[in-house]
Image: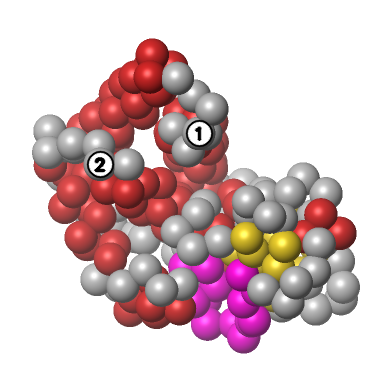
């Protein structure tokens, strides 16, 4: 398999899951500004949507959208710790978190990377992202991870998006549980491997 990624982008969540399940894969870095791959190819040929992640499968087909890719990988590997069994309520809890992170946290942060955004709009989106991180931090109170004691694909996604607060110099000192969570996830061997491979540590 091949993962098309951009360092520190939402593709990091898929990268972490790939390393957690231990399946062999290759990495292909994408310049999202130029929409070219590390080999100089037009990335739109791989993914007409133009963004990462994209997972090229062994059979030549491709999957896009991080939460879906992670569910596919965990199911293929039989890793019900990372993605609980189909039909179980716990699976829907993990999917519930993935949907929240994707639609509420990710999208609020995503707007802040748009250089065309004026200061007023940036303040609005920054406030939205911060409030959602505060709420998430409260949900982590008394828990190791989002759904309990098991690290799941949703945690890989939250860790990835949570890192953007530092990149954007957002003060989240009022989110102590989230900060502890970020440190806890960062210490996982698979996460360290992914961060090193992307040049983030």
* 80 up-or-down from 159: above or below: below
Q: Which residue is drawn at 32% across and 42% down?
A: 168
Return the residue nearer the eye: 173 or 143: 173
Left or right of residue 78, residue 89 in this image: left
Stretch in magenta: 14-29
Q: Can residue 80 be seen in this view?
A: no
Q: Residue at x 80, y 69 (%)?
A: 41
- In space, the residues marked 1 and 2 are separated at their CA atoms by 16 Å
Left or right of residue 33, residue 79 in this image: left
Which residue corresponds to mark 1? 115
Q: Is residue 22 magenta?
A: yes
Sequence order check, earlier mark of 1 and 2: 1
**What secondary structure is found at the residue carrying circle 1?**
loop
Q: Quadrant of the C terminus?
A: bottom left
How far across and down, in percent of the image, does residue 73 sit?
63, 66
Return the residue nearer the eye: 18 or 5: 5
Q: Does the magenta stretch include residue 124?
A: no
Please state which of the two labelled residues, at mark 1 or mark 2, is closer to the viewer: 1
**Residue 69 position by quadrant:** bottom right
Which residue corresponds to mark 2? 169
* 133 up-or-down from 124: above or below: below
């Amino acid at each position: 398999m091949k993962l098309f990624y951009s360092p520190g982008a939402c593709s990091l969540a898929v990268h972490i899951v790939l390393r957690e399940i231990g399946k062999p894969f290759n990495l292909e870095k994408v310049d999202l500004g130029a929409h070219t791959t590390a080999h100089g190819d037009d990335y739109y040929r791989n993914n007409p949507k133009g963004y990462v992640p994209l997972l090229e499968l062994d059979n030549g087909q491709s999957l896009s959208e991080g939460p879906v890719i992670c569910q596919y990988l965990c199911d293929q590997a039989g890793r019900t710790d990372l993605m609980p069994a189909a039909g179980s309520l716990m699976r829907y809890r993990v999917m519930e978190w993935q949907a929240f992170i994707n639609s509420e946290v990710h999208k609020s942060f995503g707007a802040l990377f748009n250089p065309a955004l004026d200061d007023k709009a940036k303040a609005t989106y920054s406030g939205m992202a911060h409030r959602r991180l505060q709420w998430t931090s409260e949900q982590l109170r008394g828990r190791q991870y989002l759904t309990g004691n098991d690290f799941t694909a949703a945690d890989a996604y939250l860790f990835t998006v949570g890192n953007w607060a530092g990149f954007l110099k957002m003060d989240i000192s009022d989110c102590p549980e989230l900060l502890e969570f970020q440190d806890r996830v960062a210490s996982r061997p698979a996460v360290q491997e992914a961060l090193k491979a992307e040049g983030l540590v």
